[in-house]
Image: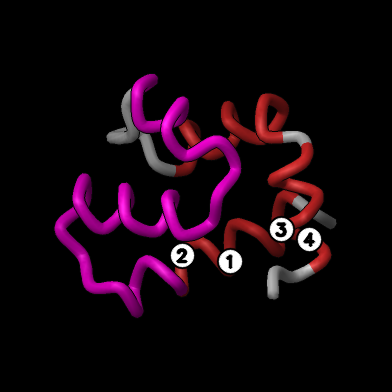
Amino acid sequence: MTAPGWERIEGNWNEFAGKAREQWGKLTDDDITVIKGQRQQLLGKIQIRYGIAKEEAERQVADWENRVTR
């Protein structure tokens, strides 16, 4: 089950995609297209592009989600 904030991100991905690119500049346009607002896809792409553990990616995404959905 996704959090209400994530449902907003998923439903308005085109709006939030730019904010994701600002946060994670290593994400490519293709990454953004593949993600399509799917949290698990975003986590996976962040792990790959930044070479970080799943837990760190989770923390970063949770922090970002809290900021952008206020």
Indicate which disc residue 10 carries.
none
Sequence-first tag of 4 and 1: 4
Indicate which disc residue 6 carries.
3
- Locate the N terminus and report the quarter of the image it occupies: bottom right
Indicate which disc residue 63 carries.
1
- Locate the C terminus and report the quarter of the image it occupies: bottom right
Indicate which disc residue 60 carries.
2
Residue 54 shown in magenta? yes
| Left or right relative to 16: residue 4 | right
Front: mark 1 or 3 = 3
Q: Are marks 3 and 4 in contact (CB under 8 Å)?
A: yes
Residue at the extreme front of the image, as rendered = 1
**Element type where label 2 sits in the image:** helix
Question: Cα distance, mark 2 to mark 4?
Answer: 15 Å
Sequence-first tag of 1 and 3: 3
Residue stretch rendered in magenta on the structure: 29-58
The residue labelled by disc 4 is 5
Q: Amino acid at mark 2?
A: Gln
Task: Name above or below for residue 66 compared with residue 7.
Answer: below
Q: Are marks 4 and 1 in contact (CB under 8 Å)?
A: no
* Dot 2 alpha-carbon crowd within 10 angstroms: few under 14, some 14 to 19, many 20 or more: some
**Element type where label 3 sits in the image:** helix
Front: mark 3 or 2 = 3
Image coordinates for residue 44, horizontal then vertical, percent: 32, 56
* Dot 4 alpha-carbon crowd within 10 angstroms: few under 14, some 14 to 19, many 20 or more: some
Residue 21 shown in magenta? no
Q: Residue at x 71, y 58 (%)?
A: 6
Image coordinates for residue 28, horizontal then vertical, percent: 32, 25
